[in-house]
Image: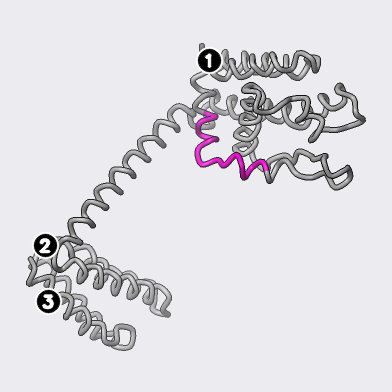
Amino acid sequence: MTKSEELRVFIERADELINSKYILADIKIVNLLKAIASSDTLIALFKNCLDGFDYNVAKKKYLVKNPYLSDEKGQFVLPPNSRELLAFVFNVLMDIDAKRISLGDFIDKYFYEDGSSYAGYSAFVNAMIKPFKNSVALLMEKVIEGKLQDPVEALTEEEERKAKQREEEELKAQKEKELSLKAYGNSVKTIKQFLLDDKKKIKESKFSDQDKKEIILVIDMLANVIDSEDKDAIEYAFIAYKYVAKAHPVKFFGRVKAISKALKDILNGI
């Protein structure tokens, strides 16, 4: 199916749920979920919305006590954005489909009107299903018009980003582990902490933006080579750092002496 056809089927199934009688709502919910499951674009759209979404936290935010009714009655609070709305309502529909939520009990608690099933179902549809349908339709129309990135493409990019991040974290963890096994590992960590503190101090200083940029460049240069095992690069970077420290003795008070001591262990260990 094309994206337009996927959207048409979704809207048809959502309208069937909206216009159905309460007694047929369960099967209409199943059909709506099937329409989502049959669309690659919608699946990707919902996966993007569900990424990082905490359903348990959301239930406490959007299903709250009704201040005007008895203690056992609650009310539904509309989520503030499409991402939260789609993720939350989708989870609720999945719970109804899986029988983790009884639709009747859910409506009676959060969409209570006058005690009638018809009025409660109408409130449920108007407050939860219609905004859900309209938000999905609006997002899909923007995708079709090219105003919004294709959810499948966005999902692929996000998965690639996460995979790359995991790889980088694994490499970093491996490097840190190898470093800790070396005799001078603690000295490297000590110097990096000194440099991190220096960088923070410079950023918060009253130096001009240009001076900050140049000083931080020297600090970063030393930080980047300190665990490289390249003696020449380390010594060169430290010489530059010493001259900066000499030019700003107040900001770098006692720092050269402290770093020199730790640096000796590193150079001896290489």
- The numbered dot on residue 264 is 3
- Per the picture, the main secondary structure of the magenta-coloured stretch is helix
**Residue 9 place in picture, x, y as percent:** 62, 13
Which stretch did the figure color magenta? 45-59
Q: Residue at x 43, y 29 (%)?
A: 153
Left/right of residue 133 with respect to residue 160 in the rendered view? right
Residue 259 tag number: none
Answer whether residue 47 is magenta in the image. Answer: yes
Residue 70, picture quadrant = top right
Q: Give left or right: position of 250 versus 6.
A: left
Which residue corresponds to mark 2? 229
Q: Please determine whether, in this image, residue 42 is positioned above or below residue 195.
A: above
In-front residue for pair 51/80:
51
First in sequence: mark 3 or mark 2? Answer: 2
Sequence-wise, the earlier of marks 1 and 2 is 1
Secondary structure type for disc 3: helix
Q: Is residue 74 left or right of residue 55?
A: right
Residue type marked 3: Lys
State the residue at coordinates (54%, 18%). 37
Q: Position of residue 140 (x, y in %)?
A: 58, 25
Disc 3 to disc 2, C-alpha distance? 13 Å
- Of mark 3 and mark 1, the one earlier in the sequence is 1
> At which x and y percent is residue 266?
13, 70
Is 52 contained in the magenta span? Answer: yes
Q: Amino acid at mark 1?
A: Ser
The residue identified by callout 1 is 38
